[in-house]
Amino acid sequence: MGQRVRPPSAHPEVAGGRRWPSLFSRLGRRSGWHSLLSCCLFLGLSACQPASYRLDSRYASANQNERIAFLILHYTDEDDAHSLRLLTEPQYKVSAHYLIPRDTDQTPLPIYQLVPDSQRAWHAGRSRWHQYAGLNTSSLGIEIVNLGYETGQELLPVQLRHWQPYTQAQIAAVGALAQELIRRYQIPQTQVLGHSDVAPERKQDPGPLFPWRELALQYGVGAWPDEARVEQLRRQPAPAWDALAWQQQLARYGYGIAPSGDWDEQSRTVLSAFQLHFRPALVNGEPDAESQAILSALLERYFPESR
Ligand SMILES: [Zn+2]
């Protein structure tokens, strides 16, 4: 789930119904206003106010794009009932556009739309990808009911923790929904991401058991490297990247990492987010030939011009 965020402050004219009586009583005290006020109250406010502008939409600009540029996937870390409460009740200050439940025998699986696509949901929190920051503004969020890893295993390496698998019904529902949203909003495949990709220092959802490969190959959802090319790159004796090269290539793909030249905590965290997504069998944040081959193949496929 996302970092909790403050709700936008309500517009006083919309939220503060108590303003009207005081305004009316002030106006009503002035001579001459009383009859106009009565007229407005009787006919409705708009009927006796002259229009102050006329909207003319003849000149549409070619220079615009879809506000929604990302699809961010999460697990809820809660069961069905708690997930629904957390994502809908005002005191929790978190939400997502869609919630995919787990323990229901309804067929097909229901998907709860909690926030309309046109509205900003509060799921990503502090987050970065390429030049974007604060991705709640530019994304849709899908939360999937899943308990993550077992309580008390926080200090174990990712691959030694016991993670709850996703159900086939959930995977099919995510695949079909994501396919539709990508098509509707023309979301680039490299911008279908996990919460861990855009907030690697805080988040590990949707976790190493999330089926990114299956979604990409069977549903056309999200980026995936050409596997034959990965194999070829692994067999080529390419020089291993140093810390700076790793940081630069991860940043080129989109990760929020500042090239420092030192293999620091930030670098390990971001590389482990990359491994969670593209090489979940070993998520240790340490550079190796396989991760390098996968990232090289991804860059060749999706960002060939950005060298
Ligand atoms: Zn999340």
Image (tube, grey):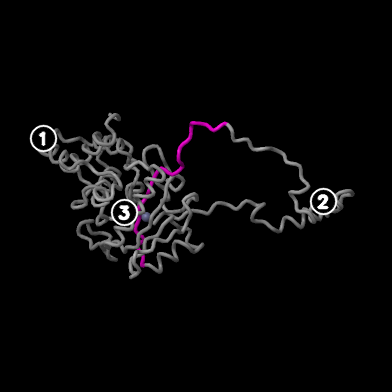
Label ID, residue 27 = 2
Label ID, residue 12 = none
- Name above or below for residue 160 compared with residue 217: below
At horizontal 37% and vertical 46% (from top left) the residue drawn is 182
> Residue 239 location, x and y as percent?
14, 33
Which region of the structure is painted magenta? Answer: 59-79
- Name above or below for residue 35 compared with residue 242: below
Image quarter where the N terminus lies is bottom left
Q: Identify the element where label 2 is drawn.
A: helix
Name the quadrant where ligand 1 sits.
Answer: bottom left
Q: Identify the element where label 1 is drawn.
A: loop
Residue occupying the far right of the picture:
31
- First in sequence: mark 3 vs mark 1: 3
Q: In the rendered image, which residue does mark 3 sit on?
A: 175
> Residue 216 location, x and y as percent?
26, 48
Q: Residues within 10 Å of mark 2 (few under 14, many from 20)?
A: some
Image quarter where the C terminus lies is top left
Q: Amino acid at mark 3?
A: Gly
At horizontal 59% and vertical 33% (from top left) the residue drawn is 58
Q: In the rendered structure, does residue 65 fall within the stretch colored magenta?
A: yes
Tell me how far mark 3 sits from mark 1, CA to CA: 34 Å
> Residue 257 location, x and y as percent?
32, 40
Q: Is mark 2 within 8 Å of ligand 1?
A: no
